[in-house]
């Protein structure tokens, strides 16, 4: 069965954005005339995803006001502290109502095939507990640092290499249960999948830009302009 629920991560402080996030959350920063979170929601809508849960913490009231009245969108507020990706996803599970979900970061911009459609088409729950969308480091615009994973001929992942994780994935949520912490990264879940040979990857064939820092805004806008000119 294909997943039909999406966790959209939007709770962070956006500290790498400096003054731009002093009075607004990073998901509401404009890129090419649209808030970042609307770029992500456009992908979800294009893929026909029925349930979307957005986690919030920093300046949560602004995100809530922006999303008010959006069909199919529910907020998972992390009131006392940010729970990180793993803790935030587990906190949102009652709202997601699914044992297999998409996740997507709200601070990236994409061109080319819809990443959520690509993941859904390649998802094989018999072999996989997780499926990540990657881009080669040479095509990871706005990204600073090395890659994250290497993919073998079957698509199975190992740590290290030139494949940059884009923030888009499909994940079986049952793997969150054994983690004995309320605040934790999905890296802890991925490590278990890696050890069992059940974390796989897929290459995104279009453009991807990390908009986690101010320079990423111009890079993303240039990438979108290039895609329109093609």
Image (cartoon, rainbow, N blue to C red):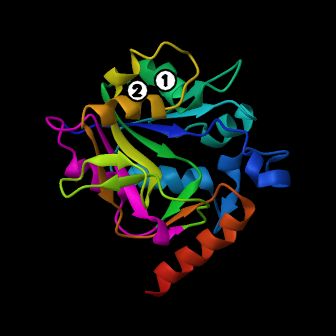
Numbered circle sitting on residue 92: 1
* Residue at 31% from the left image edge and 48% from the top image edge: 157
Q: Which residue is drawn at 63% across and 59% down?
A: 211
Q: Which of 119 and 95 is in front in this view?
A: 119
The correct choice, above or below, for 135 with respect to 12 in the image is below
Residue range of the region highlighted in magenta in the rendering: 111-140
Q: Residue furthest bottom?
A: 229
User: How packed is label 1: few (under 14 Cα within 10 Å), some, or many (20 or more)?
Assistant: some
Q: Name the residue under label 2.
A: 96
- Residue 104: x and y in percent read 47, 45
**Residue 117 seen from this side:** no
Please provide percent x and percent y for residue 170.
33, 41
Q: Position of residue 9 (x, y in %)?
A: 55, 39
Viewport quadrant of the C terminus: bottom left
Q: Residue furthest left?
A: 126
| Residue at 61% over, 65% down | 142
Which quadrant of the view contains residue 94?
Answer: top left
Q: Tell me, yes or no, whether the two marked residues, 2 and 1, touch with CB atoms within 8 Å.
A: yes
In the rendered image of this protein, does residue 229 appear above or below residue 96?
below
Instruction: Tell me the element at label 1.
Output: helix
């Amino acid at each position: 069965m294909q997943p039909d629920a999406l966790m959209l991560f939007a709770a962070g402080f956006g500290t790498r954005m400096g003054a731009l996030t002093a009075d607004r959350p990073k998901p509401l920063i404009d890129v090419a005339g649209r808030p970042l979170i609307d770029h992500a929601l456009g992908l979800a809508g294009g893929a026909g995803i029925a349930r979307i849960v957005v986690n919030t913490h920093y300046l949560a009231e602004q995100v809530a006001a922006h999303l008010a009245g959006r069909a199919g969108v529910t907020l998972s507020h992390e009131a006392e502290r940010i729970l990180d990706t793993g803790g935030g996803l587990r906190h949102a599970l009652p709202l997601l109502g699914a044992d297999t979900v998409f996740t997507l970061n709200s601070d990236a911009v994409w061109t080319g095939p819809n990443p959520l459609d690509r993941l859904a088409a390649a998802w094989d729950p018999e072999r996989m507990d997780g499926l990540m969308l990657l881009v080669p480091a040479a095509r990871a615009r706005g990204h600073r640092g090395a890659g994250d994973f290497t993919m073998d001929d079957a698509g199975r992942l190992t740590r290290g290499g030139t494949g940059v994780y884009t923030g888009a994935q499909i994940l079986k949520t049952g793997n969150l249960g054994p983690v004995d912490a309320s605040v934790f990264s999905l890296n802890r879940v991925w490590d278990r999948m890696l050890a069992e040979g059940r974390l796989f990857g897929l290459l995104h064939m279009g453009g991807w830009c990390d908009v986690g820092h101010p320079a990423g805004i111009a890079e993303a806008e240039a990438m979108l302009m290039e895609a329109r000119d093609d």
